[in-house]
Every structure is written in structure tokens, then in C-alpha cells.
Image: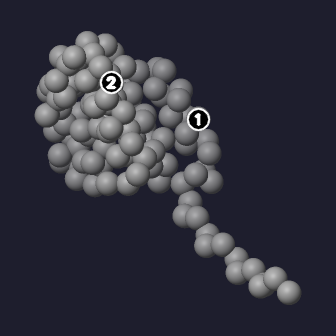
Amino acid sequence: MGRPRRLRALMVAAALAACGAPEPTQLADCAGLPDAAAQEACRYRFIEPLLDDPSALDAALATIDDPGSRDLVLLRLAIADPRRAAGLCRRVTTEGAQARCRQVLGRPHLQSTRRPPEPQAPPP
């Protein structure tokens, strides 16, 4: 797990502890969190690791009844991994998410692989 992902997980856990809510142990538990932002962060935290497993990703997304919540997860995944954005954005259904996906897809430079830095001459 990378540093930013680990930091996000710790922040969610701290926020849940401050609210007195138990930390969810599975995706279905996210719906029981007290506020919408915590629910969305929780869903993303469980679904993001499934990005490399299309059938597990499909199954997890199917458990989210609200199209807006499902689209928010897809949009966040597209932003986090622009190389997969086109495939993820094809799945969004709400107008707001479709507009946001057009913005993400309109930045093709984010989808390319970074070039390694050019070697620099040592200082004299």
C-alpha cells in the first residue's frame, strides 16, 4: 500500500474514531457511517484495491445502489489512474459524473507514461 493510500486510510480511521463509529470491515458497512462524505471515502477505500480485478470491481460496484455514489467511486478511480479513465468513465451514468469524466479525458497527457528524467552533468 502506497504512502498516500495509507495516509487516507489512517485519516478515515481517525475520523471514524472521533465520531465514535466503529471502523467498517467490509464494503457493506460503509452505508452505516454517519455522514455522506465518510460513506464515500469508505467505499473508495474498499473498491480502489479491486481496480486490477475487473470481476471483483464489478461485483463491488453492484453493491452500491445509489447511481451518484457509484459514479463518484468510478470518477475518483478515473482521476487516480488516468490511464484507465476511459474505461471507467464509460460506466458512469449521471450527468455530473459524465461532465467531470470529459474533463479528465480531455487531459491526455495524464494518461501517458512519465519519461525518466534526463541525466544532468555533474557540477564543475
- Please identify the residue farthest to the top as the structure is shown: 34
On the image, the x and y values in percent for residue 44 come to 31, 35
Q: Is residue 85 visible?
A: no
115 lies above or below 47 = below
Residue 40 occupies which quadrant of the picture? top left
Relative to 110, residue 11 above or below: above
Question: Which of 17 and 102 lies nearest the eye of the viewer?
Answer: 17
Callout 1–callout 2 Cβ contact below 8 Å: no
Q: Which residue is mark 1?
A: 103
In percent of the image, x 24 and y 48: which residue is there?
Answer: 50
The picture places residue 48, in percent across and down from the top left corner, at: 31, 43
State the separation of the CA atoms marked 1 and 2.
31 Å
Task: Characterize the local packing of mark 1: few (<14), some (14-19) or many (20 or more) Cα atoms within 10 angstroms.
Answer: few
Mark closer to the observer (1, 2): 2
Q: Amino acid at mark 1?
A: Gln
Name the amino acid type tagged 2.
Answer: Ala
Q: Residue at x 46, y 20 (%)?
A: 95
Q: In the rendering, at what x and y percent does residue 120 appear? A: 75, 80
Q: Which residue is mark 2?
A: 15
* Crowd around label 2: few <14 · some 14–19 · many ≥20 (10 Å): some
Classify residue 112 by image quadrant: bottom right
Q: Quadrant of the N terminus?
A: bottom left
Sequence-wise, which precedes: disc 1 or disc 2? 2
Identify the residue at the far right of this view.
124
Residue drawn at 55 percent across, 39 percent down: 104
**Depicted 29 relative to depicted 124: above or below:** above
